[in-house]
Image: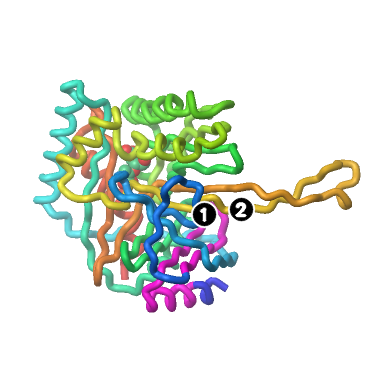
Amino acid sequence: MVADLIARAKIQLKKELPFVLYSKPKEAVLNAVFQADNTLHEVVDYTEQGFVFAPFLDRKSPVLLKADEVSKVTFEVPLQQATAPIQEVSSNPDEEQRYIELVQKAILEIQSGNCKKIVLSRTIHVSLDKPIFVVFKELLNTYSNAFCYLWYHPKVGLWLGATPEILVKTSGLNFTTMSLAGTQNKEAGQERPDWSSKELREQQYVTDYIAGILAHRATDVLVNDVETISAGHLWHLRSKITGRFYKGMFKDLITALHPTPAVCGLPLGGSRRFILENENYQRTYYTGFLGELNFKKETARNRNRKNQENSAYRSVVTTSELFVNLRCMQKVKDSVIIYVGGGITADSEPRSEWSETESKAQTMLRLLAT
Ligand SMILES: C=C(O[C@@H]1C=C(C(=O)O)C=C[C@H]1O)C(=O)O
């Protein structure tokens, strides 16, 4: 039962031992990985097995939780999605002004020709007035389309989030990735939003960049048509990209894909430099990635279709499912830090960019309402 798994995680937290609870998009299965001791393991060459938690910058190694104990339970997703009320945060005028000036500076940088796109972000500090496991249960019920998680390591901290974005998903050499960009609020009764050329262009930049990265790392690359997806109270534009990567190039694939222009910008070096020099805080694990690394999955295959019952045999395939750490927050003592951002291009309007971060913050803020 979900309650038993959560009770097990509470004990793990009390003992200050690493664990992660997570559910994959549309699966209604709560997974858990518990590490037996508090060692801080690192991912070095991506042949390791476990649950990876990687920062935005590669200055620090990704953390690996060893899957000493794994568990999973199915849960009922409420038919009626919980629509928690909008949570007001007293909008801080100084912070709004500071962010608007930051966006203006990024637009100038883009106009000067140094960059095409820069993803900016900021933090919001909110007091935490209910137990973190209660927040997590609401997160599971509210965002069944997302990758939902609660991750803890005593030497790193406690994070939770509901991200709509896959970094890369692999099964053997087959992979799926996506370019996700463009954001709009859902209006009441709205079936589909209208996308502006600014948003379509911004998403196309990401798609082209990813296709370029894959050109000499993979075969059979297929870029699917752009589609609108729902992420909580928001719409995004997404193109799914599939293919087969070359054997032995898994690490290269991940390190080339991360960070994508969906969370950093274009070109990578210039936008990263601008972020580091101007954002004025450390993103740490926000816009990093997390998920299952090199899990073994058993699949039943049929040798002979005519006589299926007798000829089924088992084969083991290595799979990874990594998600970009967005719509997330970090627990620090009795409060949380919510991380939000958005892509800036030459046509960005600073006040709308501020509003976009306010909207994205609602994904986490709604869970904190008491
Ligand atoms: C940076 C964030 O989101 C990213 C930026 C988006 C945008 O600029 O429209 C959309 C989805 C994400 O790729 C965030 O949610 O904090």
User: In the image, is residue 18 part of the stretch drawn in magenta?
Assistant: yes
Q: Is residue 116 above or below residue 20?
A: above
Amino acid bearing label 1 = Gln
Q: What SS does tag 2 mark?
A: strand
User: In the image, is residue 306 part of the stretch drawn in magenta?
Assistant: no
- The structure residue drawn at horizontal position 43% and vertical position 71%, both measured from the top left corner, is 37
Measured in 3D between alpha carbons, the distance from the residue under mark 1 to the one under mark 2, in whole angstroms, is 9 Å
Q: Nearer the viewer, residue 104 or 178?
A: 178
- The structure residue drawn at horizontal position 82% and vertical position 50%, both measured from the top left corner, is 312
Q: Is mark 2 within 8 Å of ligand 1?
A: no
Q: What SS does tag 1 mark?
A: loop
Q: Where does residue 227 sit, x and y in percent of width and height?
A: 48, 34
Query: What crowding class fits label 2: few (fewer than 14 Cα within 10 Å), some (14-19), or many (20 or more)?
Result: some
Q: Which mark is residue 49?
A: 1
Mark sitting earlier along the chain (1/2): 1
Q: Where does residue 13 sit, x and y in percent of width and height?
A: 39, 74
Q: Which mark is residue 296?
A: 2
Q: Where does residue 144 sit, x and y in percent of width and height?
A: 50, 56
Q: Is residue 279 left or right of residue 323?
A: left
Query: What range is drawn magenta here?
Result: 6-35
Q: Where does residue 222 sit, x and y in percent of width and height?
A: 55, 27
Q: Nearer the viewer, residue 192 or 332?
A: 332
Q: Nearer the viewer, residue 62 or 286?
A: 62
Quadrant of the snapshot with the C terminus: bottom left
- The structure residue drawn at horizontal position 21% and vertical position 43%, both measured from the top left corner, is 354
Mark 1 touches mark 2? (CB < 8 Å): yes
Amino acid bearing label 2 = Lys
Is residue 184 visible from the viewing direction of this image?
A: no
Q: Quadrant of ligand 1?
A: top left
